[in-house]
Amino acid sequence: MSKKYNPYDNMLEVLDSAACMLGLEEDDYIGLKYPERELKVSMPVKMDDGSIKVFEGYRVQHCSALGPYKGGIRYHQNVDMDEVKALAAWMSFKCAVANIPYGGAKGGITVDPKNLSKDELERLTRKFTAMILPLIGPETDIPAPDVNTNAEIMGWIMDTYSAFKGYTVPGVVTGKPLEIGGSIGRPEATGRGVMIITLELLKRLGITAKDTRVVVQGMGNVGGTAARLLYQAGCKVIGVSDVSGGIYNPDGLDMDKISDFTQSGHLLEDYDQPGLKHIDNFELLTCDTDILIPAALENQITEDVAKEIKTKIIVEGANGPTTVAADKILDEKGIYVVPDILANAGGVVVSYFEWVQNLQRMAWDIDVVNAKLETIMKNAFEDVWQAANEKNTTMRMGAYMVAIGRLVKAKKIRGIFP
């Protein structure tokens, strides 16, 4: 029987490799191997039929060397502690790569939200907020949306936290609705960041957008936005997918129409246009393209997939979509891989902007948000590009070296208490 994939083990292996490239001793970075705090909660919730169901939830705070903890909350039936620990660590590295003053955290509830009514979802969210209340706050740990959570759920969290405090605290979460302190540009920030990084890499490689074919796995907030923006930038998007399957057309897809279709609540299995072919997930990931953007969940590009991949570039819109074993195969094949901790950092960058606006009781306009996002993403790309080239290694190792270097330096400056 093959060993079950453990994303935390995956993170540790990459961490060790990057630390070795930096010439660090284990004592220099051993603290990064362990989360600073882990919380598991059990939540009895009254269902619509009057029965009581108990759900399990998690909040993990990985590293606070650079600032308050920051990280999303996901609702998914496969959420467990190892996944949340890995995601929290990746958030630490992501914030360090982007050079913003945050540490890493993550949260989740083991639940399939499609099986809950809206009232049940709200009760579960408010219960979870109450259970993790001792850990979160605008100066300590600031949650945000992730898989299967959205602005409305962030609003419930903010309201619940504020009720306990006795006054409105908009800065306790980011990704909120605009009406209660959210930032314009936040919903599309991760996908926009993926687009910025993709175009920046193409520029470094001397490739124009109009000569580029793109395939995107995932039509959610990240993948859908990235696909649409790259299409508008001149790329030819030839394949996309959602939970119902993928669609493919070598002559290109109209991403404006497809985005409107999916955002209205439809699945791609029901979409049709002349020349379009419906394909499964494996076919989508392994079709002939120039750029592949996995923007769904972790553990998508495995060894079996990597052996068959025919792309030139992979830009990781999702967190941890590529296994360590697959990464080695991609490197041997000469495929550029832009790692998640760089590629999808746009979300946390604009979450940072939202938090700053909340603390200052200000609201920026979209041009300011997008301009600041572009500056930070391009600076992060430059740091990673230089680090990778200096060590003649992959962009993943370059990103981890940048992140670990900053975190280790901060930890050394702060020292060990007591």
Image (cartoon, helix red, strand yellow):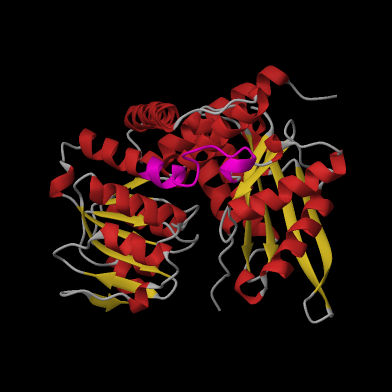
**Residue 258 in the image: x percent, y percent?**
31, 64
Residue in view at x 52 percent, y 27 percent: 99
Whether 189 is among the magenta residues is yes
**Residue 233 in the image: x percent, y percent?**
23, 44
- Judging depth in this view, the residue of 395 and 101 nearest the camera is 101
Residue in view at x 23 percent, y 33 percent: 204
Q: Is residue 280 visible?
A: no
Give the residues drawn in magenta, as a range.
Answer: 177-194
Vertical relation: 109 (above or below) 12: below
> Which quarter of the picture shows residue 5?
bottom right
- Direction from residue 25 to residue 44 in the image, left or right: right
**Residue 301 in the image: x percent, y percent?**
40, 62
- Judging depth in this view, the residue of 332 and 83 nearest the camera is 83
Vertical relation: 155 (above or below) 258: above
Residue in view at x 41 percent, y 43 percent: 343
- Direction from residue 104 to residue 261 in the image, left or right: left
